[in-house]
Image (cartoon, rainbow, N blue to C red):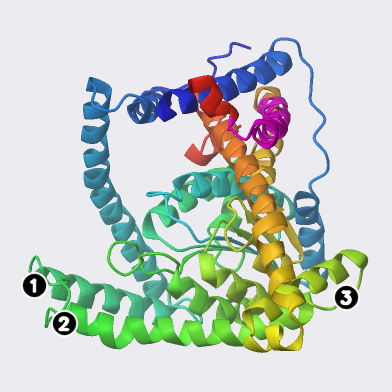
């Protein structure tokens, strides 16, 4: 089996572009860097086209669900189509700058009065679920869980004003946990993750990582 | 100078990967990949869903553009593995994403996978396969986490009667929401998180978690192709090299009071 089996022209193009972007980091101010800047600008343009592809596909998908009257879905799909229409009309109708900060436009009204409140509702849910998750995580069911709980108590007491008042050692031990073992562990994880990304990139550069492009293997 | 040092490191790690691939591809040595609990749990999750008559869900919260592109690509690779298994088992599945471009790619990939398994009629049957986008896009409104997906997620789990949910990617502060919503819906949950963001939340709320390089290794492992598995050998060599370098650099800095890189550069 030849090593180049399955390396198709789009994949070759993607690999060349990836190499240019990669080397522009190491050779700033050179021709490769300029070429990389041009490619990055093109990414924005291609990205805009990609959004349209996605949007048209989404509309087609939603309209089909409405036409088929898919139970439990069709009215949501209809709502989605209406929202897309409102956003498109308001966005294009009000022209460039319609999403600028402080602009009195329909699209910004929707953003300020609908989206931001939805995000705040999410933050409220997060707060509630932090407590339930913490309750479950802090049950000492094994030695590892007990060590986790012990570390958490010290860190918690470091930040709680009452911690230092109860025992002066809480802020010291809590600080040590954060700045010594936790930082070391996090750096180890980040380095390991970085190597994983390079391994993935190596597979990609050699034309072996094709599944994400819809190709087998 | 810092760039040259980075280049040396990068070339070095690439050479290790190339050596790993050479060992597997030319010399036919298949590396041993230790068991990744979260990957083994995928089969368990599929079995659980079949037994309980519930659905399987695969979620990709990230986008194809921007800093999370590699995360999305590896998530799509893992989705293809899960989709093949789901199609083979004939289990009803819901595939959810947060942006329109990912939806388009997902639909194409899933159609091919179900056709390859001879289950195209399942793909066209909304009772069997659903491909969903629950997100707000990413230009103005979607900066950061996928708010719409996180808000819709608890309802989706209840409505679709999901038994097993596989979350592949990273969604910052919302990760806790996914985990806790799944717990409330009594779902078997697997998190495949290739980033270091909010890992503690994932560990606290999900049943199984594969993290960082485990996920990238899983991407190679699921293909079962030897040239892909070769990168695992390279990853191991690179990891051990880094461990040795960290120990040497730390020892030199502790003994001499100067960093080794500073001494080498002069």
Determine whether the residue tagged by mark 1 lies in a helix, strand or loop: helix
Disc 3 to disc 1, how far (Cα)?
59 Å
Specify few, some or many for label 2: CA neighbours under 10 Å numbering under 14, 14-19, or 20 or more: some
Q: Nearer the viewer, residue A213 or A115?
A: A115
Tell me whether the residue at label 3 lies in contact with that at label 1, contact meaning CB atoms closer than 8 angstroms: no
**Residue hosting label 2:** A106
Q: Picture quarter containing residue B220?
A: top right
Q: Chain of mark 1?
A: A
- Asked if badge 3 and badge 1 are on a common chain, one would say yes
Image spot of residue B31 (x, y percent):
79, 26
Residue B214 in sight here: yes
Question: In the picture shown, does residue A105 fall above or below B216?
Answer: below
Determine whether the residue tagged by mark 3 lies in a helix, strand or loop: loop
**Residue hosting label 1:** A93
Q: Quadrant of the N terminus of chain A?
A: top right
Image spot of residue B172 (x, y percent):
52, 65
Specify few, some or many for label 3: CA neighbours under 10 Å numbering under 14, 14-19, or 20 or more: some
Tell me whether the residue at label 1 lies in contact with that at label 2, contact meaning CB atoms closer than 8 angstroms: yes
**Residue hosting label 3:** A140
Image spot of residue A210 (x, y percent):
53, 33
- Residue farthest along the front direction in this orientation: B256
Provide the residue span drawn in magenta.
B231-259
* Mark 1 or 2, nearer chain start: 1
- Asked if badge 2 and badge 3 are on a common chain, one would say yes
Image spot of residue B78 (x, y percent):
62, 47
Asked if the stretch drawn in magenta spans residue B236, the answer is yes
Disc 2 to disc 3, how far (Cα)?
52 Å
């Amino acid at each position: 089996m030849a090593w180049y089996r399955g390396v198709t022209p789009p994949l070759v193009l993607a690999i060349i572009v990836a190499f240019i972007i990669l080397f522009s980091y190491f050779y700033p101010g050179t021709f490769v860097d300029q070429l990389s800047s041009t490619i990055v600008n093109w990414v924005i343009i291609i990205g805009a086209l990609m959004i349209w592809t996605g949007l048209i596909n989404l509309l087609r998908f939603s309209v089909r669900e409405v036409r088929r009257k898919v139970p439990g879905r069709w009215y949501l799909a209809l709502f989605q189509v209406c929202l897309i229409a409102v956003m498109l009309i308001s966005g294009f109708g009000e022209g460039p700058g319609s999403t600028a900060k402080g602009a009195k436009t329909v699209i910004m009204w929707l953003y300020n009065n609908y989206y931001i409140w939805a995000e705040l509702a999410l933050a409220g849910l997060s707060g509630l679920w932090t407590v339930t998750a913490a309750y479950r995580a802090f049950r000492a069911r094994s030695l590892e869980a007990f060590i986790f709980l012990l570390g958490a108590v010290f860190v918690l007491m470091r930040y709680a004003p009452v911690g230092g008042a109860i025992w002066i050692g809480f802020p010291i031990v809590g600080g040590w946990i954060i700045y010594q073992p936790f930082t070391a562990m996090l750096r180890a994880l980040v380095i390991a993750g970085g190597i994983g990304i390079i391994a993935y990139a190596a597979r990609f550069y050699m034309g072996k990582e094709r599944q994400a492009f819809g190709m087998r293997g | 100078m810092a760039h040259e040092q980075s280049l040396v490191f990068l070339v070095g790690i690439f050479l290790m990967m190339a050596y790993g691939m050479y060992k597997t591809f030319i010399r036919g040595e298949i590396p041993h990949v230790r068991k990744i609990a979260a990957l083994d749990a995928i089969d368990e999750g599929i079995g659980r869903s079949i037994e309980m008559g519930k659905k399987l869900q695969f979620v990709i919260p990230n986008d194809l553009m921007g800093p999370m592109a590699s995360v999305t690509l590896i998530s799509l690779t893992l989705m293809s593995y899960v989709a093949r298994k789901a199609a083979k088992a004939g289990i009803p599945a819901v595939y959810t994403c947060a942006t329109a471009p990912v939806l388009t790619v997902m639909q194409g990939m899933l159609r091919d996978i179900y056709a390859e398994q001879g289950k195209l009629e399942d793909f066209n049957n909304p009772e069997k396969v659903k491909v969903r986008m629950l997100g707000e896009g990413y230009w103005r409104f979607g900066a950061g986490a996928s708010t719409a997906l996180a808000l819709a997620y608890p309802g989706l789990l209840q409505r679709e009667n999901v038994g097993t949910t596989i979350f592949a990617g990273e969604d910052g502060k919302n990760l806790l929401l996914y985990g806790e919503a799944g717990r409330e819906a009594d779902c078997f949950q697997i998190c495949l998180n290739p980033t270091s963001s909010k890992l503690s939340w994932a560990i606290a709320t999900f049943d199984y978690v594969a993290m960082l390089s485990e996920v990238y290794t899983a991407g190679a492992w699921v293909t079962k192709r030897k040239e892909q598995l070769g990168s695992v050998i390279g990853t191991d060599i690179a990891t051990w090299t880094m461990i040795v370098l960290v120990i040497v650099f730390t020892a030199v800095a502790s003994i001499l009071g100067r960093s080794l890189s500073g001494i080498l550069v002069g």
